[in-house]
Image (cartoon, rainbow, N blue to C red):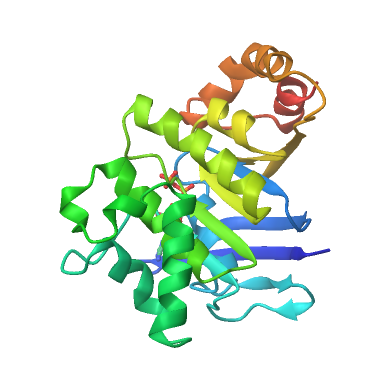
Amino acid sequence: MFLTIKNVQKRFTNYGKTELVLKDINLNIKEGEFVSLLGPSGCGKSTLLNIVAGLLTPSEGELHLDDCLITKPGKDRGMVFQQAALFPWLSVEENIMFALKKEMKKKEARVIVQKYLQLVQLSSYAKHSPHELSGGMQQRVSIARALAMNPRVLLMDEPFGALDEQTRRRLQDELERIWSETKKTILFVTHSIQEAIKLSDRIIVLGTHPGKILKEIPIDIDRPREQHIQEIVYYEDMITKLLKNEIDNVVEEELYDAVSY
Ligand SMILES: Nc1ncnc2c1ncn2[C@@H]1O[C@H](COP(=O)(O)OP(=O)(O)OP(=O)(O)O)[C@@H](O)[C@H]1O
């Protein structure tokens, strides 16, 4: 398997109290797969993503990328956050160039920058400052910046969460196109069921207290998307309650019934 998450647990200690945030997380992700993590606030989605990124160490368990143990951040894993977090004093192209320059000659880096600016359809904004771009455009730059390093896996933490609905939908379309062009493996955190259905091969539903995998929902691309949406919308009430933390002590079987189809 390409990316393996094996028996991962994570505890945090706050003010002397230790909390189990992630429990028994086991996931196998294939190369080129688009996997979404969906779950209520605080269930540990970002924590899990940060563990895969190597920014956090699991309390137990281990992770492998192509049989190599993940212990620290590496350029094989690119990250995109909710906020684009571009350097405001650098131009769009300089932002993408920043990390690339450490890896190669400036001339080579420039060619890569152009390629990825083209991919996110922002070639004409290369010389602009980030503040001259809309939030959606800035996020496209941050996607180009992550992809330009040619990571094996793209880790995206609610990348469209801060955008208005229209921009969000446009960027979803754009990510879908980028994914079909690059065939990158993507691990994507979202609160939106519709977004997860639209983009993913597989949805991992996490529960909270402690965060654990409740259900894996494969999205069958051979079936019309409308069918999936109809079916998931049928269960949406239950999932939405779960996402809003309205169901506290979810009886696991009940939830399984709710999200299985
Ligand atoms: N560095 C940390 N130190 C202590 N506790 C933490 C730390 N990071 C996260 N937590 C706690 O771990 C739990 C999971 O947080 P996390 O941000 O991973 O959840 P999430 O599912 O991504 O939430 P959201 O959807 O609101 O972003 C929360 O209770 C949070 O307070």
- Rendered view: 110 above or below 127: below
Does the image show residue 124? Answer: yes
Task: Please give the name of the residue rendered at 21% of the width and 69% of the height, measured from the top-left corner.
Answer: 90
Does the image show residue 212? Answer: no
Q: Could you tell whether 218 is left or right of 88 in the image?
A: right
Q: How many marks?
A: 0
Q: Could you tell whether 131 is left or right of 7 in the image?
A: left
- Rendered view: 94 above or below 132: below
Answer with the quarter of the image where residue 36 lies: top right
Task: Please give the name of the residue rendered at 65% of the width and 17% of the height, measured from the top-left corner.
Answer: 229
- Rendered view: 172 above or below 15: above
Q: Could you tell whether 100 is left or right of 195 in the image?
A: left
Answer with the quarter of the image where residue 169 lies: top left
56 or 169: nearer the viewer: 169
Quarter that holds the N terminus: bottom right
Q: Position of residue 191 (x, y in %)?
A: 48, 35
Q: Position of residue 141 (x, y in %)?
A: 36, 55
Q: Position of residue 199 (x, y in %)?
A: 61, 36
149 or 14: nearer the viewer: 149
User: Where's ligand 1: which quadrant?
Assistant: bottom left
Task: Please give the name of the residue rendered at 27% of the width and 43% of the height, measured from the top-left corner.
Answer: 135
Q: Position of residue 92 (x, y in %)?
A: 28, 61
- Rendered view: 225 above or below 156: above
Answer with the quarter of the image where residue 163 lies: top left
229 or 24: nearer the viewer: 229
Task: Please give the name of the residue rendered at 59% of the width and 24% of the height, measured from the top-left corner.
Answer: 239
